[in-house]
Amino acid sequence: MNIPQQLISIYSELKPRLDVVEQRVAASLLTYSRENMLPFVARIKTIESAAEKIESGRYRSFAEIDDLVAVTLVVPTLRHEAEAISYCQSIFHIEEVKLRTSVRKPPELFRFDSTRLYGFLPRPLGLDVDDQETIYEIKFEIQIRTAFEHAWIVATHPLTYKTDVVDWKRIRLAAQMKAAAEQLDLSVLQFEHLADGIVEAPFPDIQAKREIVQLIELLGRDSVIPSEANPKDMSRFADNLINLLRASQKKTDIHVALAAIEKQLRRFTLETFPRSASLLQVCMGILQEVGLISGPLQRYSCHVTDHLLEIFPGVRGLTPVFEYARTKAPSLEEK
C-alpha cells in the first residue's frame, strides 16, 4: 500500500524508541512468564498497520494510537487473569484496564473481547516530566488471553480479518469457533462440578492409578512416607509404577504389588525412610527384593543410582539402566 510521506517520517523517527519499549516490556514479563510457564508474544505494529489504524477514522491524532507496541500474555484459564493483571500493574505504570466484561455485546454475539491493559514504562526518579521525546511517553498494550482464546485468535485472524476474502460464511464460522472457545474456558472454570456429572465407565488402568494414589496418601497420613518424599505429580508417579510393572517379565498383578509395597514400606518410619532415593526407586527396590519384578525390562530404562544400590543391592540385575553420561545411548527400540 502507498504510505504517506508524513507517516513515514514520524514512524521512522519513532521506531528506535518503539524497539526499546518492546524490548523492555518483553524483558519485564519474561521472568513472570517463565516462572508460571505462560507463553507471551511481543510485537511492534508495522507502518502498514499503523496506516490502516489511521484510516479507520477512530483516532484524532497519532498520539492516540495505543498499540504500536503490544504484548500478548497467555494465561491457562480465566481464573488466572486477575493475578496477571496485578503483576503487570506492579511493574508498569498501567493507565487503563479494559476488562473483557466491560465491552457491551449482545449475548448472541461472539467476537474478540480479550482483556487489555494500557500503560507506560515506569519513569525513573529525577527524569524531566515535560520531556515528550523519551521512551516513557510511549503507551503500549498488553492483551491477556486464555489459552483457548489465544488459539482461536491465532487460527482465525488471518482467515477472516487480515484477508482479501470477504465471506459471510467464513465470518460466521469464526464466530462459532469463538463460541466454542468460550465454552471450553467455561468448562475449565467449572471442571470439578462438570466432572461430577459424567457417568463413569469401568477402565482398569484408571482404577489401578486411583488405588496407587490412595495407598501413597494413606502411608503419608500414617507417618510412613515423609512429606518431602511425596512425588511432585501423584498421577505421573502412578503411571510410572504401572509402566514399571508392565515392563517386567513377571506380569505381577497390581494388587499383589501394592500389598507388597505397603508391607515393606510400613517397616520404615519417618526417621528411617530412605531419603537418598525417590519414592519410585524405593518401590522398584522393594518389588525386586520380593521377587515381583525382574530384568531385563521391556521398553523401560530403570533409574538405578549408587544410593539406591546401597539400599537395595539386588536392583543391579534390573536392566536396561538409565545412563547419566552425556553420550547418546541406544534407543529402547534398538535394545
Image: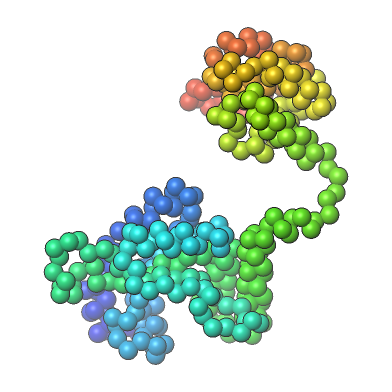
Image height of 168 relative to 84, above or below? below
- Say left or right for 31 vs 254: left
Number of numbered discs present? 0
| Residue 121 locus on image (x, y percent) | 28, 64
Quadrant including the C terminus? top right
Q: Nearer the viewer, residue 6 or 120?
A: 120
Residue 46 visible within the image: no
Residue found at x 59% / y 63%: 148
Q: Quadrant of residue 17?
A: bottom left
Q: Quadrant of residue 168?
A: bottom right
| Residue 164 locus on image (x, y percent) | 53, 81
Image height of 335 relative to 72, above or below? above
Residue found at x 52% / y 73%: 100
Residue found at x 63% / y 12%: 312
- Say left or right for 317 vs 154: right
Image height of 245 relative to 173, above or below? above
Q: Nearer the viewer, residue 168 or 240?
A: 240
- For the rendered model, the colour scheme is rainbow
- Say left or right for 67 vs 151: left
| Residue 45 locus on image (x, y percent) | 37, 72
* Residue furthest to the right: 202
Q: Quadrant of residue 232?
A: top right
Residue 119 visible within the image: yes
Image height of 130 relative to 21, above or below? below
Quadrant including the N terminus? bottom left
Residue found at x 34% / y 54%: 27
- Say left or right for 79 vs 190: left
* Residue furthest to the front: 222
